Image (cartoon, rainbow, N blue to C red):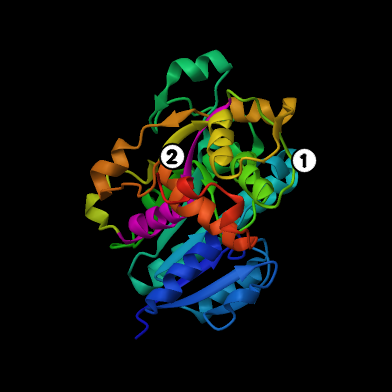
Amino acid sequence: MTNQCVLITGANGEIGHGLIRFLSREGLTKIVALDRSPIDDYQKEVEFYKGDILDRNLIDELGRRYQFDTIFHLAGILSTGGERDPLLAHNVNVEGSLNLLNMADAQSMQRGKPVVFFFPSTIAIYGFESLEQKVKAGKINEDNYLHATTMYGINKLYIENLGRYFSQTYKRFDTTPGLTRIDFRCIRLPGIMSADSLPSGGTSDYGPEMIHAAAQGKPYECFVTPETRLPFMAMPDAIDAIISIARAKKSVLSSTVYNIGSFSISAEEIRQEVMKYFSAAQISFKPNPQRLAIVNSWPGDVDDSRARRDWAWKSDFDRVSAFRDYLIPGIMRRYSVSASKVSLTSCVGA
């Protein structure tokens, strides 16, 4: 029996599809989905609204029509798109988020019960002045190097602070006793690798793009250098982390913002993993200076000990199992790649 109602914005993206898939399998949640394009695969599982988070009238109407227990706010313009049109990115990422925070706050006060507001931040909120500084820093925690260098990262960091403001200090001069604020929760995601959906042009998408190209027998020019390093995780781990923090008891959370990680890997190491399974893959490196500069400003690894301590975060996939057990089999199925065309010993984990 349905006992929860959630709103998922940006529902047609990679994470949105993953959340809908997870919640649909459980069958305990009414799912309201919002996106600018229809979600054809999940017409029966969701109540879908085609629209924009900048449409305040639509957001307010959703707030009147439903009583949301949780809002998963995933909609936004990513890093590369944000650099192409920073003003549009600011409007969508910041003003759209403000519309949703305001709606969630109103619902929380009306019901006398906080709406859980989940927001996916990113390692793009961090910034290094040089590659040498990045290498020297190693794993970084949530409190250091908060110097975003892209409009996307700046927007994300600002929304983290907006969420903290709405949940802790908004209307602090209001004398009404017992005001209920939203329950804002945020994780800073590393690069995400998905077997179930296509890369969407993010700056960290060179990882999954290598695998998808190899599975299709297409050559791929990687836009970073072989030494370029970022933290990554498999999509199922990202979905698990989002569900876990959204459902964690408020009493165990010492912060509104958490790093999460799985494995740190260089572009060359990704190429090597892909070559284990697609020995004929044609992967070369042709760095794009602008995109490389963005990636080099992001950390090579993150310290997620706060999440592990507070809400028992733990990834299921490491570097080897992410490729062997999730990415390669899933992408092979997507493109109907015959097992005879890849290394059988690699696929069984030898």
Q: Earlier in the sequence, mark 2 or mark 1?
A: 1
- Which residue is at the front of the view, 231 or 151? 231
Q: Is residue 79 above or below residue 145?
A: below
Residue plotted at (33% across, 62% down): 179
Q: Residue furthest front?
A: 340
**What whole-number distance in Å separates the C-alpha atoms at marks 2 and 1?**
32 Å
Q: Does the magenta run of residues contain 242?
A: yes
Q: Secondary structure at mark 2?
A: helix
Q: Secondary structure at mark 1?
A: helix
Write down the region rendered in magenta: 228-247
Mark 1 burial class by Cα count in 10 Å: few <14, some 14-19, many 20+: few
User: Quadrant of residue 277 in the image?
Assistant: top right
Residue plotted at (30% across, 48% down): 313
User: Quadrant of residue 11 in the image?
Assistant: bottom right
Q: Which residue is mark 2?
A: 319
Asked whether the beta carbons under mark 2 and mark 1 sit within 8 Å of each other, the answer is: no
- Rendered image: mark on residue 84: 1
Residue plotted at (52% across, 66% down): 8
Mark 2 burial class by Cα count in 10 Å: few <14, some 14-19, many 20+: some
Q: Is residue 21 above or below residue 297?
A: below
Q: Does the magenta run of residues contain 250?
A: no
Give the main secondary structure of the magenta stretch. helix
Residue plotted at (62% across, 57% down): 96
- Which residue is at the front of the view, 331 or 110? 331
Left or right of 300 on screen, residue 240: left
Residue 243 x, y percent position in the rendering: 38, 60
Left or right of 12 on screen, residue 175: left
Residue 214 x, y percent position in the rendering: 66, 46
Q: Quadrant of the C terminus?
A: top left
What type is the residue that disc 2 sits on?
Answer: Arg
Q: Is residue 152 visible?
A: yes
Q: Quadrant of the N terminus?
A: bottom left
